[in-house]
Structure formats: C-alpha cells, structure tokens
C-alpha cells in the first residue's frame, strides 16, 4: 500500500530533488496577489487606532520569503535585536542592516530567537550592524512569498532572496567595481554566540544560543540556532569582529558582544555574488546536512521557481473569483500570513531538539515535528482552517503537542522556543488537540487523553515545576470555587490576575474535554467536564448584566466599568469579554435575559464602537447573531469588518496578526462561515463576499461555493442549499463540508430576516 504523503512533505521532496530542474509553472499564479508588506507599518484601521496602543498598533509581521511552515524565514532586517516585541522589519524604518534568517513568531509580541544575518558591503569594510545600515527606497523593493529584491543605495548593491524549508539562497549584484565584503553575525543580545571562518570551504559557520522568556525568563532554552553560510565566490581575505573591533585573519570568536565574521573579495561591475545558508536547531553539522540536501548548488532561479510553485499549491487550496484586484490581494495575503507558523523544527533526517530538553535531541521518523504554537490565538480560526484544507499538517502539529506532553508530563499551555511558557491564559493547546480529534483529523490513545485530563485536573506537586510553566495557572482556585476569585493574584504567570477571563477560557477548555470524553465513550468524564463547561455562569453578574470580577465569598466587585480595561480581564474590557462563551451561546442569551435583550445589547456594542478586531477574544462576536435569530446582522458586521479592518496598505491589519489568526479570520469571513466553537464540528454562516469560491479540502474533495449576484448591497443570505439540501439554521456541518459538493447561497438586498 502506498503511504499517504502530506503536501508539505511533498514540497520538501521537491526541494530535495535536483534543484537544477524547474517544476512546471501552475496555470494560475496566485503569488501575484500576495503583498507581504501588508501589516509592516502601524495600523490605519478604525478599531486598531481606537483600541490599540504601543505594539498592538502594528501587525508585527515581516516580509518573509519562506516555505509554508518553514523552520527559518528570510526577511530584510531593519532592526538588530532579538528583544521582545521587536520584529526584524518595519516599513517606516529607513535603513536595512542585513538579511535575516529569522525564527520570529509572525505577527506576535514575543521574541526573535536563534537568528542570524548576512549583509553585503561594498567599499570600506563596516561590520557593526549599528553602523553598516544602508538606505533603501520602497520603490526598489519587490516583495513576494517566494522572492524579495531591494537596492541597497549606500552600497550600490541589488539584493535578492529565495528559500527552502531550512535554507536561504541570496544573490547580490555589485553595481560598482572594487572591494566587496560579506558580513555575517548571530543576532545575540546577550553577548553570546560563536562564529568560525572555514576559508578552504568558503564557509562561515556559527550559532546563537536561545533563551526563554515568560516563565523561566532569561534561562537557556537548551538549544541554539545554528547556521552554515557558503559563498560561491572565493574570498581574498577573512576575519572576525566584535562591534567595531575587526581582527583580520582570525578564524574564530565566541561569546563577545555583537560578534560576527566576514569575507572580503574583489568584484567587477555588475558581478553577482551568491551565498546559501543552511540552518538547524541541532548542530552546525546538521545545518550543513540540511544545506547539502535542499540547495546542493547555487541555482537561484530553480530554487525560486520551486518555492513559487510551493506557494501556488498552498494558495490555490482556496480559489476566489472576482474582478476586484484589491480583494484578491487582501485574500491571498491573508492566506500567506496564515501559513507562517507553527514552524517545522526537525532537520531533513528527522532530528530535532527535545522539548524542554536541555541539549538533548530526538528523531521523528514520520511527518514533521512542529514548534512555536501560539495556542491562545490560533485555536480560534487558524487550526480550524488547517483542519479543512491542510489536515495532514495539522495532524503533525497536534501530534507534536502530544509529544511535548509525553516528554515532560504536561501539555504545554503556549509552547514557544521549544519550552514551557504559560505566557497566555487558558489551556488552548488542549483545545487544539480536542478540535482535531472531534473533526477526525487525529485519533487519541488512552495515554494522550490522560494527558489532557492531567492538565485539567492536576497541578504540579513541585512548586518549581509550576513556576517553570507546567500546568494551568490558578487551577486550584478554579476547581475549589468554580471560578477564579479576585483574591487569587495568579502570581506565577506572565499575565497576572485576569481572573474572569481565565475562568471563561477554562470553561471552554473543559467543554472541549467533555466533547472528547463523550466521543470516547467516557460518560462519567463527559458529565464532569460538561458541568465545568458551564462555569462561565459563575462570573456573570446579573446586577450589571455582564461578566464581572467575583470574590471568594461570592460577591461581585463594584470596581466595574464595561468600557474600561480592568485588571480581571485579559487585554480588553468587561464588555468585550462578556461574549466569550463560544461553547454555549444559547446559555449566554438566557443569562442576559433572552434574545431581545441580547440582540439589543449586541447592537449597542457595535454601534458604540466597542468591537475591537485587533485582538482575539472577540473574534467570534460578529457571528453571534446567528444564534440569536438575526443572522443578517452577522452578514452586515462581518462584511464591514472585512472592509474596514483589512486593507492593501502597509498599515492594513488592525492589530498583531498573532501567527496568522487575524488573517485566518479574514479567510473564514470572506468565504462566509466561521468556527464560533471550534471543538464542535459546525460553522456559523454569515455569507460569502465573492460570487464563486472553490475550496480544495484536505481529503481531496472540492467544495464549490456559489453566491450569484453577491455585492456590497446584495449581501444578505436569503437561503442556503448544500448539495441541493436546504440549510435552515444558518449553521453548516464540518462533515458535510469536507465531503465536498456545491454550497449555494441566494443573496438579497433585504436585511429584514428574523429567524427564530
């Protein structure tokens, strides 16, 4: 029997094949609609300007040249640091200081780690990143998912980049004759790292040790970002440096501030100098092995074409048809942003650093091991998107989460830099596992189900383990009271307090576990966790008709203002978090006094501009009218968000893209349905914004979505038919969708639908 091969594995095989032979170009080039510059400048959207602030005013994406889910992303570099909340590239910066092999969590406010940079220089040798920057103009930039080009004005060099899963290929055209240099450095802020020049191989190798943040902040993560840079042109001279101190002829340097190495050579006018860089999280030798396997030569055009083909394969999984070019750019850029992370951690031979492993390694023999899973953000729409169109890859991601749990005994809350972090609230890695199981993307063993229960029921016996990030935060309070009282400060967490938000999100996690238990035939567990899934009711204050902070004695705080950010709410206001009951919207409607009051309150919420699209906890809110009998309002609000919170300019995202969650929301909103409660295999319908959409499901089936006459005014759904069958309740079954066929929408300009 032939083994099933995932599309990412197929991409890797293409790269491992002879790169000198270009793949056939697909009939339609979807990459032409991807603009990686979108989101690289401060937001210009309405709610982003109103509700955001500081780093939340920027999508925190960078214009990466990268394979989908690649180990290393390649970006122009305008910053020289790995500090928290600092991306490699900002559109408004004026100098490029290098081209980075990056492990940045796309769209995040976390940290870069294990990165390196290469910079071509002409004329006088300048090594220090703080001094070597070159002016550039945006009109010389060409930015796509498969290729980047810019002219470095200070050096009269044209720089180009393309990539494979673990490697980068760069080409520099020197426009003036004379001295040329290639400067390489690990991006260490700790004065650590290592470089070595191997002149007989035209190589510079090195590593950049990774450090944790959040729980265990500053401690070594137990692995490094390793690299091997090989230059096609032979060098005339070489050396190492630390800041401004250059040591010509020296081959090694270790643990010095701003250290690096360089090659020097003579160039003719118009001469091209190519370098290729292999990366690994295991060792320098593994980085060399990855480089030899993925880019055996220096054939730039072939690697670029293969990467373009890989992106067209990914982007074509959803084909939308419209004559509006800007809408195509918004949609396919959202697709590009949605396939950045989680990242592949293993080398071509399967080796990867063990999770929380203190310099130990493991080997995966089937599929890929993934890291950098931004669970608090991505369980909402990103992983549901993968479960539709990339289930094999999502299965590997979920299996990776479970491997992490098996290795260290606790499913990680928010696994980043291959470590525990407890950075955000909730237990959403478990939610990601539960959704994949409920949608038949994975199976679960008794051991794996036990790990999920362990997270929900136990706290580490050793306080040191809890401090290190293992287990749910404030679980004992939650289990004792059915909510987290305000007296519990939740000290051992990056996000302290935020008791109401934690309660609400744990209730969703418990609901997910209940669904898993029910499917596995565990009746007692189902009843137990289903009851805990109702714990959201324990923080609903009828006196203010809203979620509110509650003390251990059962009384609610008077320190309440639905419009203001409160200490017991995560990154938002009580009103914005009031709607976070994705598992039981009908129960929330009942708590608030019925559909009439619910709808009126939700109307006021939108009318008063309280919806903040730039942060994740409210992403389900626009679809909640589906459950309260007024789905036409969802159609109106979703379409308005698609138009006002996303644009084609560099400020065109309304907040941190957070590993693609913001972009995945756009995709679901545009195709017309959304996973309000991901662990239930159904979607709430708002209606598509395109007349024709074709979705290539991960199982090979195709779903055609037809909405003839669809327009900005003809935007309300009058009727829905799936394969000829009438859909009455504005909800679609996941099983029905992945079986393919035709989903037909009858559109209308009449908004007065009221479905009870």
Image (cartoon, rainbow, N blue to C red):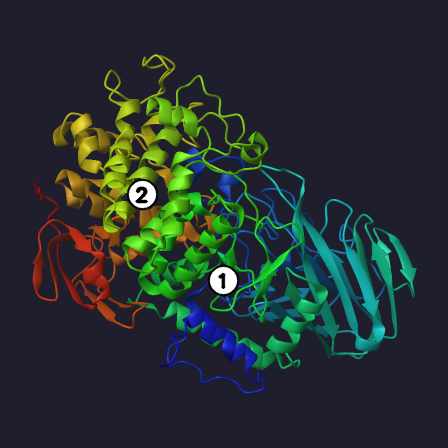
What numbered label is drawn on residue 644? Answer: none
Q: Secondary structure at mark 2?
A: helix
**In this rendering, would 109 be left or right of 738?**
right
Circle count = 2
Calculate the distance from the C-alpha at mark 1 to the C-alpha at mark 2.
28 Å
On the question of residue 710 being in view, the answer is yes
* Residue 415 x %, y %: 51, 47
Q: Quadrant of residue 604?
A: top left
Q: Residue at x 26, y 26 (%)?
A: 537
Residue marked by disc 1 = 69
Considering the numbered disc 1 on the image, is that residue within a helix, a strand or a loop? loop
How packed mark 2 is, by other alpha carbons closer than 10 Å (few <14, some 14-19, many 20 or more), is many
CA neighbours of label 1 inside 10 A, class few (<14), some (14 to 19), many (20+): many
Which quadrant does the N terminus fall into? bottom left
Q: Position of residue 468 (x, y in %)?
A: 58, 37
Q: Left or right: where does residue 75 sit relative to residue 450?
A: right
Vertical comparison of 184 with 131: above or below: below
| Image location (x, y in percent) of residue 659 | 47, 51
Q: Give residue 463's quadrant in the image.
A: top right
Q: Does residue 690 appear left or right of residue 463 in this picture?
A: left
Instruction: Note whether 242 is above or below 5 in the view shown.
Output: above
Front one among 307 and 377: 377
Q: Earlier in the sequence, mark 1 or mark 2?
A: 1
Mark 1–mark 2 CB contact (< 8 Å)? no
Residue 646 in sight in this render:
no
Q: Position of residue 31 (x, y in %)?
A: 44, 70
Q: Which residue is mark 2?
A: 513
Which one is in front in this view, the residue at disc 1 or the one at disc 2?
2
């Amino acid at each position: 029997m032939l083994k099933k091969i995932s599309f990412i594995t197929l991409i890797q095989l293409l790269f491992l094949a002879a790169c000198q032979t270009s793949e056939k170009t697909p009939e339609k080039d979807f990459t032409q609609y991807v603009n990686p510059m979108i989101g690289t400048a401060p937001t210009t959207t309405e709610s982003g300007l109103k509700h955001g602030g500081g780093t939340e005013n920027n999508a925190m994406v960078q214009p990466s040249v990268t394979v989908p889910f690649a180990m290393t992303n390649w970006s122009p570099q305008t910053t020289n640091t790995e500090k928290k909340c600092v991306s490699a590239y900002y559109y408004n910066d004026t100098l490029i200081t290098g081209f980075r092999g990056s492990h940045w969590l796309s769209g995040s406010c976390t940290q870069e780690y294990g990165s390196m940079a290469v910079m071509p220089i002409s004329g006088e040798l300048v090594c220090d990143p703080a001094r070597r920057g070159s002016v550039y103009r945006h009109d010389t930039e060409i930015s796509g998912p498969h290729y980047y080009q810019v002219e470095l004005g200070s050096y009269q060099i044209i720089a180009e980049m393309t990539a494979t899963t673990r490697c980068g290929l760069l080409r520099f055209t020197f426009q003036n004759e004379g001295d040329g240099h290639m400067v390489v450095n690990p991006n260490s802020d700790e004065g650590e790292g290592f470089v070595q020049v191997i002149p007989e191989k035209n190589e510079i190798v090195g590593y950049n040790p990774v450090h944790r943040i959040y729980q265990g902040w500053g401690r070594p993560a137990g692995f490094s970002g390793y690299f091997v840079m090989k230059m096609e042109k032979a060098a005339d001279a070489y050396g190492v440096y630390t800041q401004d101190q250059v040591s010509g002829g020296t081959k090694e340097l270790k643990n010095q501030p701003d250290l690096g190495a360089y090659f020097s050579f003579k160039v003719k006018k118009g001469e091209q100098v190519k370098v290729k860089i292999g990366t690994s999280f295991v060792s320098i030798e593994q980085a060399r092995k990855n480089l030899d396997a993925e880019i055996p030569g220096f054939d730039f055009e072939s690697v670029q074409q293969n990467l373009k083909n890989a992106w067209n394969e990914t982007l074509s999984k959803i084909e939308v048809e419209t004559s509006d070019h800007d809408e195509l750019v918004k949609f396919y850029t959202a697709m590009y942003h949605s396939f950045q992370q989680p990242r592949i951690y293993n080398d071509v031979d399967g080796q990867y650093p063990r999770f929380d492993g203190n310099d130990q390694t493991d080997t995966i023999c089937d599929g890929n091991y993934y890291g950098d899973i931004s669970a608090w953000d991505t369980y909402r729409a990103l992983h549901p998107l993968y479960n539709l169109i990339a289930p094999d890859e999502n299965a590997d991601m979920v299996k990776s989460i479970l491997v992490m749990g098996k290795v260290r005994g606790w499913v990680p809350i928010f696994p980043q830099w291959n470590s525990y972090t407890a950075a955000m609230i909730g237990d959403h890695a478990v939610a990601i596992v539960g959704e994949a199981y409920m949608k038949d993307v994975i199976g679960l063993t008794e051991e794996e189900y036990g790990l999920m229960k362990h997270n929900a029921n136990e706290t580490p016996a050793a306080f040191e383990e809890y401090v290190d990030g293992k287990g749910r935060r404030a679980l004992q309070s939650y289990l004792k009271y059915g909510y987290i009282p305000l007296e519990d400060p939740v000290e051992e967490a990056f996000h302290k307090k935020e008791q109401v938000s934690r309660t609400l999100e744990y209730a969703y996690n418990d609901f997910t576990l209940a669904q898993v238990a029910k499917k596995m035939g565990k009746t007692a567990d189902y009843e137990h966790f289903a009851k805990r899934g109702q714990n959201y009711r324990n923080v609903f204050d009828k006196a203010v008709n809203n979620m509110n902070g509650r003390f251990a004695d059962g009384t609610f705080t008077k320190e309440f203002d639905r419009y203001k950010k409160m200490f017991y709410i995560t990154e938002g206001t009580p009103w914005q978090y009031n709607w976070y009951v994705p598992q039981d919207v009908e129960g929330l409607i009942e708590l608030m006094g019925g559909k009439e009051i619910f709808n009126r309150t939700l109307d006021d919420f939108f009318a008063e501009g309280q919806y903040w699209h730039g942060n994740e906890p409210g992403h389900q809110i626009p679809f909640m009218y589906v459950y309260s009998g007024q789905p036409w309002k969802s159609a109106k609000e979703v379409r308005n968000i698609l138009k006002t919170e996303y644009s084609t300019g560099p400020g065109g995202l309304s907040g941190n893209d957070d590993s693609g969650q913001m972009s995945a929301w756009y995709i679901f909103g545009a195709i017309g349905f959304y996973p309000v409660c991901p662990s239930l295999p159904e979607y709430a319908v708002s209606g598509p914004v395109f007349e024709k959409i074709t979705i290539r499901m991960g199982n090979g089936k195709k779903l055609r979505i037809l909405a003839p006459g669809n327009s900005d005014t003809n935007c309300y759904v009058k009727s829905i038919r799936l394969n000829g069958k009438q859909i009455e309740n504005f909800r679609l079954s996941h099983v029905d969708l992945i079986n393919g066929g035709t989903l037909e929408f009858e559109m209308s300009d009449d908004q007065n639908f009221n479905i009870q």
